[in-house]
Image (spheres, rainbow, N blue to C red):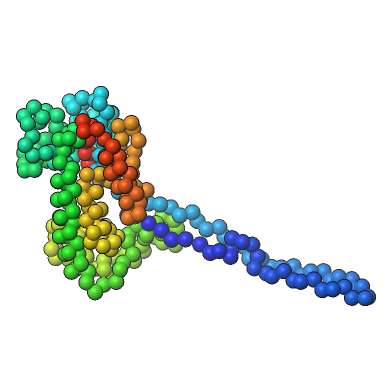
Amino acid sequence: MSTVNGTPLTRHGSRVPAIPTRPASAKATPAAAPRPVRTRATTSARPTVTPAPTIATMIICLPDALSAQALTSHQLDTHFNVTGTLAPVFWAVAQLRVWQRQQMIGLRKGRPAPCAGGPVRLLDLHGMRHAAAVGAGIRYQIWQQVVHGTRAATPWPVFETRHLTDPDRYPLDTVIAEFHAQPRVHAMRLHAAAAPGPVQPCVGELEMYQAGQMAYQHYRAASAVAGDAMLTADGRKLAPASDALAHRITYLEQALAHLDTLDPDQRLLAVAL
């Protein structure tokens, strides 16, 4: 759950101006020895440490050769080097035929019917994105009322980056206290305590809310089908560099672009890590 940086003059040597030379007088006098110029020792800045992203759900593009019978939770590590469980985050299309049910992975009863995966053509990705956007719009309206009158807050990834970059100067307890001390965070935590539930705004998505309603709806809609990371059929892993919104957006751009190139028969699998 991101970053700060250094000064220009220390990178370009001394600030002492060059002294112009005087014209030589008729009587030459021995030149005085130049005074030594004192220079300050500069300490090199610590390299910024980027915190690891939070990966709760991974979308796996399954190789054609892998049978559906091999897709059990205890075999995920064998096939994909992933430790997790099958997650029913996808929706099967409406009017699923009887013979098509055999192609689905972890299909459950319901309307829409949740499942852990299946061929792209049998997954209602459009419906999932639409529903996620609608739900995000409702949460954003709640959030806007909850934080009304508070200043924009610094998101958690910034504090976490400070701690990881310089743990002596920014101990973990200190950055947690500073993050929670912000009035906008106070408002969100108080609301969550008074009205707990899955539809309530989450402090972990503070930066996403502050980007605006449309941005938050697009973020949740894209995340509904792309998860937090993706493993392509040829073994490439797509993931955000950190939990910062800019890194999350970069991942979603890559994941959605990859989904658009998939064949309708390509199978997807959702895994909870």
Q: Is residue 144 visible?
A: yes
Is residue 49 or residue 219 the one in the foreground? 219
Number of marks present in the image shown: 0
State the quadrant of the C terminus.
top left
Q: Residue at left 14%, top 32%?
A: 104
Q: Which of the 4 quarters of the picture holds residue 32? A: bottom right
Which residue sits furthest right? 27
Q: Residue at left 22%, top 72%?
A: 148
Q: Whole-percent x and y of residue 237?
A: 34, 38
Q: Whole-percent x and y of residue 151?
A: 29, 71
Q: Which of the 4 quarters of the picture holds residue 67? A: top left
State the quadrant of the N terminus.
bottom left
Q: Residue at left 18%, top 53%?
A: 133
Task: Name above or below for residue 271 compared with residue 135.
Answer: above
Q: Is residue 85 visible?
A: no
Q: Whole-percent x and y of residue 254?
A: 33, 44
Q: Residue at left 68%, top 69%?
A: 16
Q: Which of the 4 quarters of the picture holds residue 194? A: bottom left
Is residue 77 or residue 67 the one in the foreground? 67
Q: Whole-percent x and y of residue 55?
A: 28, 46
